[in-house]
Amino acid sequence: MYYIFYKIYSFYKRKRYLPITMSIGFLFVLEVCIFFFLTMIFNFSTNQLFSTKHLSSIGIKIICYSLYIISTMLLIYRYGFKERRERIIEKSKNGKDPFKTWQIALLPVLFIALSILVIAIGKK
């Protein structure tokens, strides 16, 4: 995640368009997509435990909102402070550059596509 933060941060820093906010926002979207993918796999392996069949609508909303708040707080704690962010940037600058920024930007799309594939396979 540090490398992804660094790539998105450096992209938006060059554009001079809210690099910290956009990087944290992108990481949040990526975490939501990964969580959705893992939830779909878990749902179909446990006979849809996290569905409205087993949970009420309010229960699902409480779970989602609490995960949203916890995830946002952790991302802000991890990347919001200047000292910590500078250490992450320095550590990531010195490493190899295995991925382009556009490849990283496609990660949420990949996880959503995999989630749809899991749903399609699970319904058969």
Image (spheres, rainbow, N blue to C red):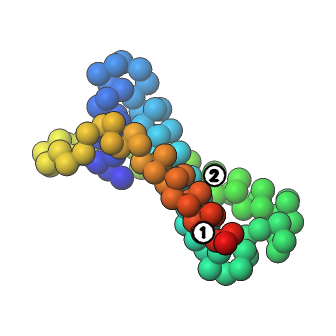
1 and 48: which is toward the camera: 48
* Horizontal and vertical percent position of residue 118: 57, 65
x and y percent of residue 79 in the render? 40, 44
Ranked by sequence position, the earlier of labels 1 and 2 is 2
Q: Residue at x 29, y 22 (%)?
A: 14
State the CA–CA distance, disc 1 to disc 2.
28 Å
Label 2 element class: helix
Above or below, 33 against 45 in this view is above
Residue 105 occupies which quadrant of the picture?
top left
Residue 72 at x, y = what percent?
56, 48
Work out which quarter of the rendered image holds the C terminus and state it. Answer: bottom right
Q: Nearer the viewer, mark 1 or mark 2?
A: 1
Observer able to see residue 35: no
Q: In which quarter of the image is residue 20?
A: top left
Q: Which residue is drawn at 14% across and 49% down?
A: 95
Amino acid type of the residue tagged 1 in the rendering: Ile
Q: Residue at x 29, y 48 (%)?
A: 3
**Can you see residue 67?**
yes
| Above or below 12: residue 123 | below
Type of the residue with mark 2: Tyr
Q: Is mark 1 on a helix, strand or loop?
A: helix
Q: Quadrant for residue 82, please give it.
A: top left
Question: Label 1: how many residues lie within 10 Å, few (<14), some (14-19) or many (20+)?
Answer: few
Query: Pointer 2: residues within 10 angstroms few (<14), some, or many (20+)?
Result: some
Q: Residue furthest top?
A: 16
The residue beneath circle 1 is 121
**Residue position for label 2:** 68
Task: Work out whether residue 44 or residue 6 is closer to the camera in this orientation and state it.
Answer: 44
Q: Is residue 15 left or right of residue 72?
A: left
